[in-house]
Image (cartoon, coloured by chain):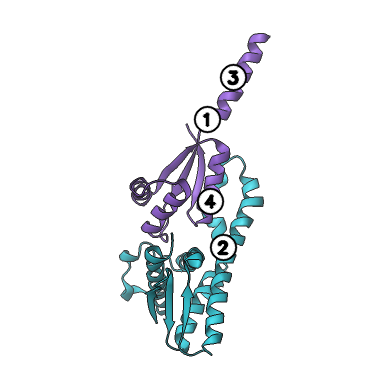
Chain colours: A cyan, B purple
Amino acid sequence: MKLTPSPDGGLRLDVEDKSDWQLLLGILHDAQGSGFDLATQVGGKMDQAADWHDWVDYVIPDLREGFLAHLKTLLLAIESARLEAAGGPGCVRIPREDAFHWYGALNQARFALEAIHHFGPGDAIDPGSLSQASLHAFIRCGFYSAIQNSLLDHGLE
Amino acid sequence: MADTETSTRTREETALDIPWQVVVHDDPVNLMGYVTWVLMKVFGYDERKAALLMMQVHKQGRSIVWAGQREKAEFYAQQLQGHQLTTSLEKTA
């Protein structure tokens, strides 16, 4: 897979084969697979505010809906590109207007993997000490971070 | 009697005026460049100020990124959480 900036802003992901498509769809699987609730995590420290119940009743469901919209943007982009390429070599475009949703979806995947594997700051990890499953997750986290860094440079405005 | 009414009103107004602080907490996932970008986007801070606050989050585990009226503080907290930053509100001591 190759990640390059688009001339008109945003990024393009050049997909080489079936395993690359699986890798991209893995973002969605990682983000949703463990049942991790990011909305509760990012809003959870509001419990000391007087209106905590309002936050739980109104704000957190809105956050959840927003985060789901990020995943839907990815699903649509990846599946439509995969269909167009008939599962073979193809290209997924990330236009600037979708960059935030892509960044958010990748973040959700990394948050969910962190909740399972507790990597902490990435530079403190010795990959040799990880189980096979954790090592694969760690590598995926690195891949997601690499896309996020490119989005920071070429997508988010 | 009049004195009591005045006193009560003053206390209520003071309570409403107490600033609320918007606090961003560190996490092991959000990239430092992203946190800076979010603070610039949500508050309109320049890059230098946003980066300073981000470094505070990174090194001290938390940073007070804004203080003011409660309603606006809640709005900002919601915005920051929508950008996946763990955020809380605190009353100024």
Of all chains, the one bearing label 1 is B
Distance from the alpha carbon under mark 4 to that under mark 3: 32 Å
Task: Tell me the residue that label 1 is attached to.
Answer: B18
Q: Amino acid at mark 2?
A: Phe
Distance from the alpha carbon under mark 1 to that under mark 2: 33 Å
* Badge 4 and badge 3 both on one subunit: yes
Q: Which structural element holds mark 1? A: loop
Q: Could you say which disc has been placed on residue A67 in the image?
A: 2
Q: Amino acid at mark 4?
A: Gln
Q: Residue at x 62, y 42 (%)?
A: A51
For label 4, count other residues whose C-alpha is less than 10 Å away and answer few (under 14), some (14-19) or many (20+).
some
Of labels 1 and 4, earlier in sequence is 1
* Badge 1 and badge 2 both on one subunit: no
Task: Tell me the residue that label 4 is attached to.
Answer: B79
Quadrant location of the N terminus of chain A in the rendered image: bottom left
The quarter holding residue A121 reads bottom left
Task: Tell me the residue that label 3 is attached to.
Answer: B10
Are dots 1 and 2 in contact, CB under 8 Å? no
Distance from the alpha carbon under mark 2 to that under mark 3: 43 Å
Q: Which structural element holds mark 2? A: helix
**Image position, residue A69 (x, y; %):** 59, 65
